[in-house]
């Protein structure tokens, strides 16, 4: 069964702290995507990782991809309240145009 | 926002009635998707389309059908709505054939089946 697992599912952290969200996937895909969703809103694309070792950074967020370990990470540096949201990873399955989503990590940054 | 709209944005309906949700895109992308989002499940693919009149099933396709008669429109039909189909439905397009290579999502449709 094709599966994408994220952990933790819930994360409450203090402003200024660092933390990492993990995304494990089950296929040999080399395409991994991160999205952000604010409550009641749609999903917004954050990062597209297209090869082993890819690293992308935007502000306090940095995403990386290790295709051999089938693992992607989303690292949060010096969290601020505005980062509070739900974060989803998704893999693009090889040979198809389907995407499989993780269940999401709900992040709450406390002031 | 890749020019994706969904209609209606909210709908309340009765069990057993047919319901059609519409997704419209303005940028001529080949691939379009319907997902449902439920707490604890993330997004699950219902159906997707890889061209006009070309569609395929996703992981939760039972009770749903789709049609795509024009590039810009992708319709999702609940043939006989059930309470288990109460959910938020998102349409998306794939820009995988472009440099940006990601999915763009519509604003969502909140469907309640009583």
Image (cartoon, grey):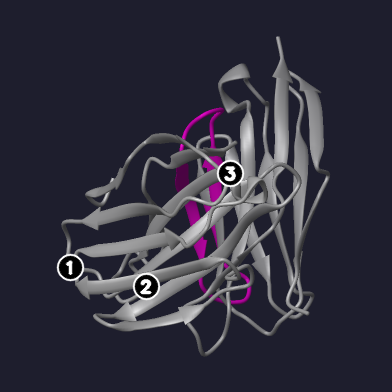
Where on the picture, by quarter, is residue A5?
Answer: bottom right
- Where is residue B99? Give x, y as percent: 30, 69
Residue identified by numbered label 1 = B28
Residue that protrudes farthest toward the bottom in the picture: A95
Residue identified by numbered label 2 = B96
Within 10 angstroms of label 1, few (less than 14), some, or many (20 or more) residues? Answer: some
Residue identified by numbered label 3 = B87
Say above or below: B65 vs A8. below
Which chain is home to disc 3? B
Residue at image point 45% right, 44% down: A44
The reply to whether callout 1 and callout 3 are in contact (CB within 8 Å) is no
Left/right placement of residue B21 relative to residue A106 reads left
Let me know if residue A48 is in the magenta part. Answer: yes
Which chain is home to disc 2? B
Q: Nearer the viewer, mark 1 or mark 2?
A: 1
Earlier residue among tags 1 and 3: 1
Residue at image point 57% right, 67% down: A54
Q: Nearer the viewer, mark 1 or mark 3?
A: 3
Which chain is home to disc 1? B
Q: Nearer the viewer, mark 3 or mark 2?
A: 3
Mark 1 vs mark 3, CA separation in Å:
27 Å
- Where is residue A81? Give x, y as percent: 62, 18
Please report the bounds of the magenta region as a residue range. A35-56
Front residue (pair B79, B41) = B79
Mark 1 vs mark 2, CA separation in Å:
13 Å
The quarter in which the C terminus of chain A is drawn is top right
Left/right placement of residue A24 relative to residue A83 reads right
Earlier residue among tags 1 and 2: 1
Query: Which element carries disc 1, helix, strand or loop?
Result: loop
Earlier residue among tags 3 and 2: 3
- Where is residue B81? Give x, y as percent: 54, 52
């Amino acid at each position: 069964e094709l599966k994408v697992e994220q952990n933790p599912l819930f994360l409450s952290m203090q402003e200024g702290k660092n933390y990492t969200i993990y995304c494990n996937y089950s296929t040999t895909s080399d395409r991994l995507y991160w999205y952000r969703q604010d409550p009641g809103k749609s999903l917004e694309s954050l990062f597209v990782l297209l090869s082993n070792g890819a690293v992308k950074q935007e502000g306090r967020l940095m995403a990386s991809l290790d295709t051999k370990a089938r693992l992607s990470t989303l690292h949060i540096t010096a969290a601020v309240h505005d980062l509070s949201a739900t974060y989803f990873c998704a893999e693009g399955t090889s040979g198809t145009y389907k995407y499989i989503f993780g269940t999401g990590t709900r992040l709450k940054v406390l002031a | 926002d890749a020019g994706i709209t969904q209609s209606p944005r909210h709908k309340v309906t009765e069990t057993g009635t047919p319901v059609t949700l519409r997704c419209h895109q303005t940028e001529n992308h080949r691939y379009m998707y319907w997902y449902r989002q439920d707490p604890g499940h993330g997004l699950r693919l219902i159906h997707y389309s890889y061209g006009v009149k070309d569609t395929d099933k996703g992981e939760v396709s039972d009770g749903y059908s789709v049609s795509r008669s024009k590039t810009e429109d992708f319709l999702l039909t609940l043939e006989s709505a059930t309470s288990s189909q109460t959910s938020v439905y998102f349409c998306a397009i794939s820009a995988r054939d472009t440099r940006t290579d990601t999915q763009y999502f519509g604003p969502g449709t909140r469907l309640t089946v009583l």
